[in-house]
Image (tube, rainbow, N blue to C red):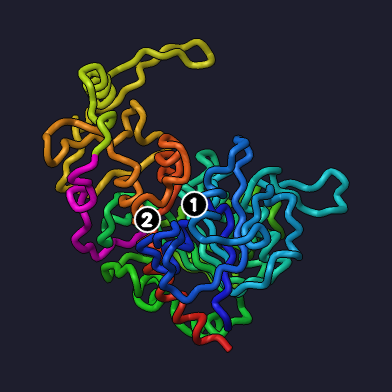
Amino acid sequence: MDKKVIELFAGVGGFRVGLNKVKNIDENGKAIENGKFSFVWSNQWEPSTTTQHAFDCYQTRFGVSAKENSNEDIGKVDKSNIPDHALLCGGFPCQDYSVARSLSKEKGIEGKKGVLWWQINEILTKKKTPFVLLENVDRLVKSPSKQRGRDFGIMLRCFADLGYAVEWRIINAAEYGHPQRRRRIYIFAYKSCTNYFKAMKKVSPNNIIYKQGVFAKEFPIEEADKKIIPIDIVEGYTDLIKVSNDFKAAFENSGYMINGKVHTVKTFPVKCKSMTLNDIVLRNNIDNFLYLNDSQISKFAYLRGSKKIPRTRPDGTEYNYSEGSMSPIDSLSLSGRTMLTSEGSINRSTHIIEDVVTGKKRLLSPIECERLNQFPDNWTNTMPYKKRYFMMGNALVCGVIEKIGNEISRIIDNEK
């Protein structure tokens, strides 16, 4: 089976950078791809902006044609025209996945408009994709707050109805040697027609989660006697409507589903030494405006300090919003905190470091933010400065994808 890939919600290409082990850019600004995955189609469209900075960056770095890289609302794309592929990958928003009957009752079940999971589901239905790799925020397994686990349950039921087995793991990148403490859920699904499915259905859920699964091999976890929780996503739920209305579950950070039978357990990583901020910060060529002035230092001191702020609820009752204190600077001996889209602004979550040469307090540069996500230096210098921060706040840690890709590559090689 050829390693043909499509990348959805592609952003600046994090999945492609990871899967094809991109470490550098050549003299023409093109990515130097060292992997064997063939990206045959991608889609990136940002509805809230005229200039498509992420799409343009992807085009520049990978040199793909407009036919190969779509800049169209995925909801308007004819899914039948998407090229055949072995692997679908993408990082999609955590949204409200609830479903309802269509108004006519004749069209069956409808998900909320604009929810991107349903676009993935439609592609899997049309293209019968053998393998799927997705990334999302870790709260997905617990959302929404009033019906814990419902949204992830809907996803799993969709996969089950389409004949997929699913493995998932919430991974803190820094615990496995990467430079950022970014916690994300990674989801790997494989269709029942694959050799891999036929082999893995003979393996116990315990062994898949702890030893033989795609995540266990690349991200080892401690052996434990913790009981694996069984959940049935099919029995008792006639369709997605029933799941949407009634299902709730305590999904843990690791799990596996086959034939609608879910097995989940809380696991603990076998940690290794992580990269630190000191490993990725620049020693020279620091832009002067990255250094904080006295006013900015004062603002950050307030934002990062403990506080109680009087606020009023919609019903008129008053309460105190409390925040604990955090370190006034980010330690260079630790890996970076989770980077947000507000990075680089005067914001509590923004990283503040002491420059290793001058000792002055400063912000991280866009290059250092790229390094936190393990992109090549200057990957995003196709766009304005502030947008570079935004893109890295939205991106994933490419080194995690590279490790997962190592195992997926071996799996696809074993397919006929």
Q: Would you place residue 190 above or below residue 273 in this image? A: below
How far is disc 2 from disc 1 in space, using C-alphas? 10 Å
Q: Would you place residue 160 above or below residue 378 in this image? A: below
Residue 229 seen in this snapshot: no
Identify the residue at horizontal 28%, vertical 58% (top origin).
178
Q: Which three-letter amino acid code belongs to the residue tagged 1?
A: Val
Q: Residues within 10 Å of mark 1 (few under 14, many from 20)?
A: many
For mark 2, what is the residue? 375
| Residue at far bottom of view | 416
Q: Would you place residue 171 above or below residue 411 in this image? A: above
For mark 1, what is the residue? 12
Judge from the rendering whether residue 277 lies leftward or rightward of residue 340; answer left or right. Answer: left
Q: Are marks 2 and 1 in contact (CB under 8 Å)?
A: yes
Residue 10 is inside the magenta segment: no
Q: Which three-letter amino acid code belongs to the residue tagged 2?
A: Phe
Q: Position of residue 205 (x, y in %)?
A: 44, 74
Q: Residues within 10 Å of mark 2 (few under 14, many from 20)?
A: many
Judge from the rendering whether residue 405 lies leftward or rightward of residue 193; answer left or right. Answer: left
